[in-house]
């Protein structure tokens, strides 16, 4: 058996021959780089899988906080889960404006997240930039007062701005026409410009605005100038963020229109909810 100093490469194993290669060898460099990438990817994948339950809990909590905030009932320090229990979740059929029990609340939330084909319909017109399709059912939330009457309605909205899809909620008063608030919880708009949709001063502009005039025409708009319908239907566009403002205008008008929540809002106005 040759000792370690014997130059007998024919008896060396693959690992020993690899280690004996020069450090600046191309084959050795590439092999080490590939091995490090594989190990790193395995570590990242394992971490992503193990943290997924925590991410889901945080996602749900963030969603609940946004519903509480847009309804004006969020107080930092409160138990979010207990506060959110005051809201009634319903799965809404957008085409009829009626609630459906086709799915349970938790089951529907999972389907909606996965964009299941069972709840998606094609769009003839897509002003909100939803990729030519939308969910035919949406999860909405009702908040009732102490007498059991509807106090606020929380509706999810989404649409394309300049760089990203904006996801948020709009809160309406019990008449389904007066806006209480609009809030986005996810977007990728430009910091300092389009991202000003998160600015509390701009969000406050929505409070008290109206969707429709007395004839039932949808008049709400996000623009630089006050529209002929009047200031009660107008929200100032974001300075330096024209396309984001147009996107917000489009998505709000789309979701409050016939393809969105209009059938439900008509039933709400008629006292059928």
Image: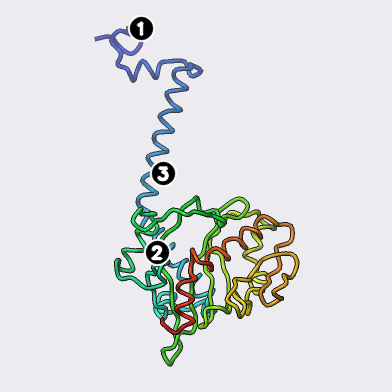
Farthest front residue in view = 215
**Residue drawn at the location 47% of the way across and 22% of the way down:** 29
Residue furthest left in the image: 1
Label 1 or label 3, whichever lies nearer to me, is 3
| Residue 44: assigned label | 3
Q: Where's residue 99, x and y in %?
A: 36, 73
**Left or right, 182 with reference to 21:** right
Seen in the picture, residue 190 relative to 212 is either above or below; the reply is above
Q: Position of residue 180 (x, y in %)?
A: 57, 78
Vertical order, 219 against 44 (above or below): below
Residue topped by disc 1? 7
Q: Nearer the viewer, residue 265 or 83?
A: 265
Q: Residue at x 44, y 84 (%)?
A: 271
Residue found 41% across the figure and 61% down from its top: 136
Q: Residues under labels 3 and 2: Cα distance?
A: 35 Å
Could you say which is closer to the camera, residue 183 or residue 75? 183
Which mark, by number, is residue 137? 2
Residue reaching furthest right? 225
Q: Quadrant of residue 110?
A: bottom left
First-in-chain label (1 vs 3): 1
Which residue is more in the foreground, 229 or 141? 229
Give the secondary structure at mark 2: strand
Q: CA distance from mark 2 to mark 1?
A: 75 Å
Which of discs 3 and 2 lies nearer the camera? The answer is 2
Describe the element under mark 1 as helix, strand or loop.
loop
Of tags 2 and 1, which is closer to the observer?
A: 2
Q: Position of residue 144 (x, y in %)?
A: 44, 85
């Amino acid at each position: 058996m040759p000792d370690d100093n014997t130059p007998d490469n024919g008896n060396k194993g693959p690992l020993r021959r690899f280690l004996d290669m020069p450090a600046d060898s191309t084959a050795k460099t590439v092999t080490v780089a590939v091995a490090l990438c594989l190990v790193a990817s395995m570590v990242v994948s394992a971490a992503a899988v193990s943290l997924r339950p925590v991410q889901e809990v945080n996602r749900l909590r963030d969603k609940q906080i946004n519903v509480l905030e847009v309804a004006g009932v969020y107080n930092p320090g409160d138990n979010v889960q207990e506060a959110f229990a005051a809201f009634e979740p319903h799965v809404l059929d957008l085409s009829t404006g009626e609630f459906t029990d086709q799915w349970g609340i938790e089951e529907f939330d999972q389907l909606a997240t996965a964009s299941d084909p069972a709840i998606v319909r094609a769009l003839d017109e897509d002003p909100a930039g939803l990729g030519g399709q939308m969910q035919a059912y949406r999860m909405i939330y009702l908040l009732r007062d102490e007498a059991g009457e509807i106090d606020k309605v929380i509706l999810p909205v989404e649409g394309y701005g300049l760089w990203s899809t904006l996801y948020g909620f709009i809160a309406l008063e019990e008449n389904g026409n007066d806006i209480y608030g609009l809030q986005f919880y996810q977007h990728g708009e430009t910091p300092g410009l389009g991202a000003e949709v998160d600015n509390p001063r701009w969000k406050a502009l929505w409070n008290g605005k109206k969707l429709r005039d007395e004839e039932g025409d949808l008049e709400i708009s996000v623009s630089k100038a006050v529209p002929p319908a009047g200031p009660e239907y107008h929200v100032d566009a974001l300075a330096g963020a024209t396309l984001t403002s147009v996107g917000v205008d489009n998505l709000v008008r789309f979701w409050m229109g016939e393809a969105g929540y209009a059938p439900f809002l008509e039933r709400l106005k008629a006292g059928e909810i």
